[in-house]
Image: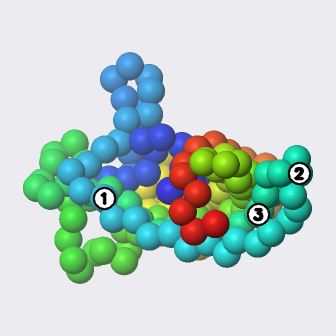
Amino acid sequence: MRGWSLRTLGPGSTVKDLRGEFGDPFRSGDMQIEANMEYRFYLATVAGAKVNSALFTDAGNVWYRTSNPDYPDGTFKFNKFLDDLGVDVGAGLRVAFTGFIIRLDYGLKARNPSPQLGDIDSQGKWFYNWDLKTVFGGQLQLGINYPFGY
């Protein structure tokens, strides 16, 4: 989920402070469902490396399989599945070298099922309070992977 930083989504639709015992974000679960869709397109070739761009969206979340009193809305339930999904949108660059690809993606939360405690008004709303500040408050992700599909 490229619109969220590490361990800040979920579990389920729990609304809770992001900070764990030691001040770091800590949200986890026993199960995860995630789907991604990308539209990739060629930009240029620089020094033998293909430079591509991508527009993407991700949907998913993490849940607990059994009840957890610390996260009352964090248990997976089929009747709440769609309400618990987080969705992000974004764009990225891909530089394809021989044998590996470097990805740089910038994602924005489009629908947040589990906001921080102080931001409860945004829970489950699409594109909540999107403005210029929101666009510059996204999440930058760096990835290195193999060139499947290029």
The residues tagged by marks 1 and 2 sit, at their Cα atoms, a distance apart of 38 Å
User: Residue 17: horizontal and vertical position, in percent?
Assistant: 42, 39
The residues tagged by marks 3 and 1 sit, at their Cα atoms, a distance apart of 27 Å
Q: Does the residue at mark 2 contact the one at mark 3 (Cβ under 8 Å)? A: no
What colour scheme governs how the chains and residues are painted in the rendered image of this protein? Answer: rainbow
Dividing the picture into quarters, in which one does residue 5 lie? top right
User: Residue 142: horizontal and vertical position, in percent?
Assistant: 63, 43
**Image vertical order of residue 149 relative to residue 7, above or below:** below
**Image vertical order of residue 66 relative to residue 102, above or below:** below
Q: Nearer the viewer, mark 1 or mark 2?
A: 2
Residue behind mark 3 = 53
Residue behind mark 1 = 32
Considering only order in the chain, which callout, 3 or 2, is on the residue closer to the N terminus?
Answer: 2
The residues tagged by marks 2 and 3 sit, at their Cα atoms, a distance apart of 14 Å
Residue behind mark 2 = 46
Considering only order in the chain, which callout, 2 or 1, is on the residue closer to the N terminus?
Answer: 1
Near-viewer residue (135 or 71)? 135
Q: Nearer the viewer, mark 3 or mark 1?
A: 3
Label 1 sits on what residue type? Gln
User: Residue 49: horizontal and vertical position, in percent?
Assistant: 79, 51
The residue that appears at 20% across and 59% down in the rendered structure is 75
**Image vertical order of residue 13 relative to residue 47, above or below:** below
The residue that appears at 11% across and 55% down in the rendered structure is 66
